[in-house]
Image: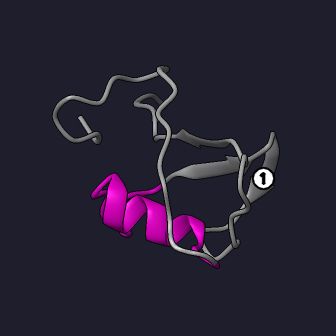
């Protein structure tokens, strides 16, 4: 629901980014994910914010909201 066409949940995808790019840049420019969608971000397994600068080889994991209550 939240990913653009062609991207599948759970499959790794490699991206090339400009130097000093942050997670928010990746989400906005490469994945086209709106900033108003709630999400949990992990970089290399550690909780992070979308302002965190990425380094070469970083693994970014996104967890989207789940329904329930």
Determine whether the residue tagged by mark 1 lies in a helix, strand or loop.
strand
**x then y, percent, for residue 54:** 68, 64
Q: Nearer the viewer, residue 36 or 53?
A: 53
Q: Quadrant of residue 45?
A: top right
Percent x, y for residue 6? Answer: 20, 29
Binning the other alpha carbons within 10 Å of mark 1 as few (below 14), some (14 to 19) or many (20 upward) gives few
Please give the range of residues in magenta. 20-38
Q: As rendered, which of 34 and 60 lies closer to the eye?
A: 60
Identify the residue at horizontal 41%, vertical 23% (top origin).
Answer: 9
Q: Residue at x 46, y 56 (%)?
A: 38
Asked if residue 62 is positioned above or below residue 47 in the image, the reply reads above
Left or right position of 37 against 22: left
Q: Is residue 51 above or below residue 9?
A: below
* Residue nearer the viewer, 36 or 23: 23
Name the residue located 47 percent from the left edge and 48 percent from the top edge: 15
Residue marked by disc 1: 47
Instruction: Residue 24: say if magenta.
Output: yes
Tell me the quarter of the picture where residue 5 sits.
top left
The image quadrant that residue 34 belongs to is bottom left
Q: Residue furthest left?
A: 5
Q: Residue at x 50, y 64 (%)?
A: 17
Split into 4 quadrants, where in the image is the N terminus? top left
What x and y, as percent, mark residue 39? 51, 52
């Amino acid at each position: 629901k939240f990913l653009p066409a062609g991207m599948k949940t759970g499959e790794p995808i490699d991206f090339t980014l400009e130097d000093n790019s942050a997670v928010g840049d990746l989400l906005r420019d490469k994945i086209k994910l709106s900033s108003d969608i709630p999400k949990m971000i992990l970089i290399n397994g550690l909780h992070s914010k979308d302002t965190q600068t990425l380094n070469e080889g970083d693994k970014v994991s996104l967890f989207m909201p789940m329904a329930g209550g």
